[in-house]
């Protein structure tokens, strides 16, 4: 990522981070959030929301325009726009700061999702020929009970669980968690089967802690599919049993014939 002018950063989108030719929403959020971190001189995204305006095929022509709205003692509030030439692609707003990995939680009523060890889970793509290019960049291992969508036998529960790490061994960072929040197959697939594209309309991620070394394990659930839209709630946990991020997105539900 190169700074072009004050507040503007080159944000190339390379091949291999896409689903059906368009860049994954979590990847775009991570790319834009990185520019927001740089502009604000803050290390971590704390809470970031992105609205998606247009598809983003691979190109070197993307630019992120960043404005630091407020630089406080603890957090900086930042807004950003991703564009390709004059075409707006996405808008984001977020709070950025320093997530303290050593600060112990004082109140947690959730528990990590019950997922078998990574070696007992199904590598993404093993059960299906319809694997997005994004998976060439990741290692995703799905809960054995959540792979029915890939064989035409969805379990009827809108849920995805599993493990995730980068294929090239890159450690998971707080910015990487933004990608992880949108890297699993849509929960809708395990409710209704693989019906088609489920494009993200809006994605919000709250980063709660620095991830410990190793893969993260995740659970994503959907409770309401209504009016052509679905919500997807996510929890991301690290190998130390800490909830490192929480997410919610609104996506378009495909028409069911």
Image (cartoon, rainbow, N blue to C red):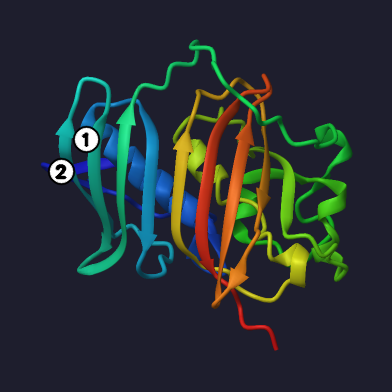
Task: Tell me whether circle 1 and circle 2 mark residues in contact (CB < 8 Å).
Answer: yes
Residue 83, percent from left and from top: 26, 61
Residue 7 bears which disc, if any? Answer: 2
Q: In this rendering, is residue 165 above or below 86?
A: above
Residue 157 locus on image (x, y percent): 78, 60
Residue at 81% x, 34% y is 118
Where does the C terminus fall, quadrant-wise?
Answer: bottom right
Left or right of 252, for residue 147 = right
The picture places residue 82, in percent across and down from the top left corner, at 28, 57
Q: Is residue 193 visible?
A: no
At 43% from the left and 66% from the top, the residue drawn is 57
Mark 1 crowdedness (10 Å alpha carbons): few <14, some 14-19, many ≥20: some
Q: Classify residue 168 by image quadrant.
A: top right
Q: Which residue is mark 1?
A: 39
Secondary structure type for disc 1: helix
Q: Earlier in the sequence, mark 1 or mark 2?
A: 2
Where 255 sits versus 245, above or below?
Answer: below
The residue shown at (67%, 40%) is 218
User: Quadrant of residue 121 in the image?
Assistant: top right
């Amino acid at each position: 990522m190169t700074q072009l002018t004050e507040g503007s950063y080159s944000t190339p989108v390379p091949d291999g981070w896409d689903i059906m030719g368009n860049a994954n929403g979590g990847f775009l959020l991570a790319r834009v959030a990185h520019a927001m971190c740089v502009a604000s001189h803050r290390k971590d995204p704390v809470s970031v929301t992105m609205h998606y305006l247009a598809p983003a095929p691979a190109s070197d022509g993307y630019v992120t325009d960043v404005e630091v709205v407020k630089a406080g003692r603890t957090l900086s509030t930042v807004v950003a726009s991703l564009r390709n030439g004059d075409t707006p692609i996405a808008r984001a707003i977020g709070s950025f700061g320093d997530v303290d990995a050593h600060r112990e939680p004082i109140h947690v009523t959730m528990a990590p999702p019950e997922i078998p060890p990574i070696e007992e889970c199904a590598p993404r793509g093993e059960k299906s020929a319809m694997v997005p290019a994004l998976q060439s960049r990741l290692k995703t291992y799905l809960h054995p009970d959540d792979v029915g969508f890939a064989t035409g036998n969805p379990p009827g529960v809108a849920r995805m669980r599993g493990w995730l790490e980068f294929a090239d061994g890159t450690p998971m960072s707080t910015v990487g968690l933004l990608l992880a929040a949108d890297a699993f197959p849509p929960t809708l697939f395990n409710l209704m089967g693989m019906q088609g594209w489920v494009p993200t309309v809006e994605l919000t991620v709250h980063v709660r802690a620095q991830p410990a070394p190793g893969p993260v394990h995740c659970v994503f659930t959907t409770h309401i599919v209504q009016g052509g839209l679905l919500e997807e709630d996510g929890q991301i946990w690290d190998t130390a049993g800490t909830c490192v991020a929480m997410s919610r997105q609104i996506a378009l539900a495909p028409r069911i014939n």
